[in-house]
Amino acid sequence: MKSRILIFALLLTLLIGCSSFWLGPGYEKVREGSSSSLVDYLYPDGEIPPAVDGNLPYLSLPVRVGIAFIPSRNSEDISAAEKQELMEHVADAFRDRDYVQSIESIPETYMTSARGIQGMKQVAALYGVDIMALVSYDQISFSGERDSALLYWTIVGALAVKGNTNEVQTMIDTAVFDVATTKLLFRAPGTHNEQRNVTLLENSRDLRKLRSAGFVAANDAMILNLEKELEGFRAAIESGERAQVAWRAGSGGGGGITLPTLLLLLVLVAARRVVESKYS
């Protein structure tokens, strides 16, 4: 009887430790993350931001916009190609707006070599943009074992039993700055959270997919908020709340012919016809 109990205890210990045999010690709960910080980029080494004054930025419309990812200081789960694709989606939100003249996607290498407020201004001057849209992100992934991981003691179990759980939380934020005054005009965040149960052999591949999909989904959510913010910004600049604006000469902006202008033109046309009929 004692020998049976001993054998059962040994088997139970083997089952509990089997997943560690497959994945190595310390796997029971793994937390990884990558991020880029807007504050750390604009104010590196603990630099204190300047006091905020009450003066409104002055914008010459249509504006030239630059979009850039803030570089990360740690390991990244997003490639340069993926960042470029995400920036193109952000740029699409700015296009076809009468107060935007052009949009420039700025490579991350330029942002890496020039940090801080002055760095942002230098990059903006290099690309000739009036406004900078800085994209930052934060992603955290969790991977751990479920109770069913005890069934990993056979090859079939490793292939069929979803004994692991992966969770990825992603946040992408776009902050839009007036370059001349370095004032924040508006910001738009987007978040996404997804969790899935997977088999042992699917775990690493699934986690990579979750991370990549998390950036896309959070970016899509951010763009929806960005479009709302852009509409709100349009209304705000028309009322003079967030910025003072003036249209550049020959830009043809300002929203087209207004009702007072149209009435004035009609009055001038009518007066001209009266004069022509009197002296004809």
Image (tube, rainbow, N blue to C red):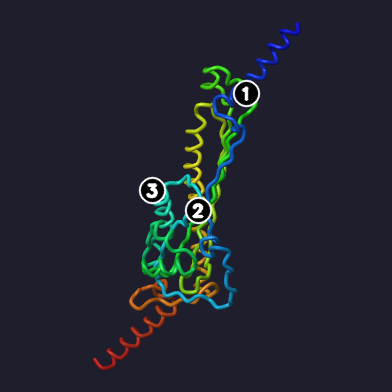
Image location of residue 128, percent across then percent down: 37, 69
In the drawing, does residue 68 fall left or right of residue 221? left
Q: Residue at x 57, y 73 (%)?
A: 50
Q: Nearer the viewer, residue 155 or 132?
A: 155
Quarter of the view holding residue 26: top right
Q: Which residue lies under the disc numbered 1? A: 17
Dot 2 or dot 1: first in sequence order is 1
Image location of residue 243, percent across then percent down: 51, 74
* Mark 2: secondary structure: loop
* Mark 3: secondary structure: helix
Quarter of the view holding residue 21: top right
Q: Nearer the viewer, residue 21 or 266?
A: 21
For disc 3, the neighbor class at 10 Å (few under 14, some 14 to 19, many from 20) is few
Q: Is 24 above or below relative to 85? A: above
Dot 3 or dot 1: first in sequence order is 1
- Placement of the C terminus among the 4 image quadrants: bottom left
Q: Nearer the viewer, residue 150 or 95?
A: 150
Considering every residue shown, the one lying at the far left of the view is 280
Name the amino acid type tagged 1.
Gly
Q: Which residue lies under the disc numbered 3? A: 81
Q: Which residue lies under the disc numbered 2? A: 73
Count how many numbered circles sit on residues in the image.
3
Image location of residue 199, percent across then percent down: 54, 26
Q: Which mark is residue 243?
A: none
**Residues under labels 2 and 1: Cα distance?**
36 Å
- Tell me whether circle 2 and circle 3 mark residues in contact (CB < 8 Å): no
Considering every residue shown, the one lying at the far bottom of the view is 279
**Residues under labels 3 and 1: Cα distance?**
40 Å
Name the amino acid type tagged 2.
Arg
* Mark 1: secondary structure: helix
Name the amino acid type tagged 3.
Ala
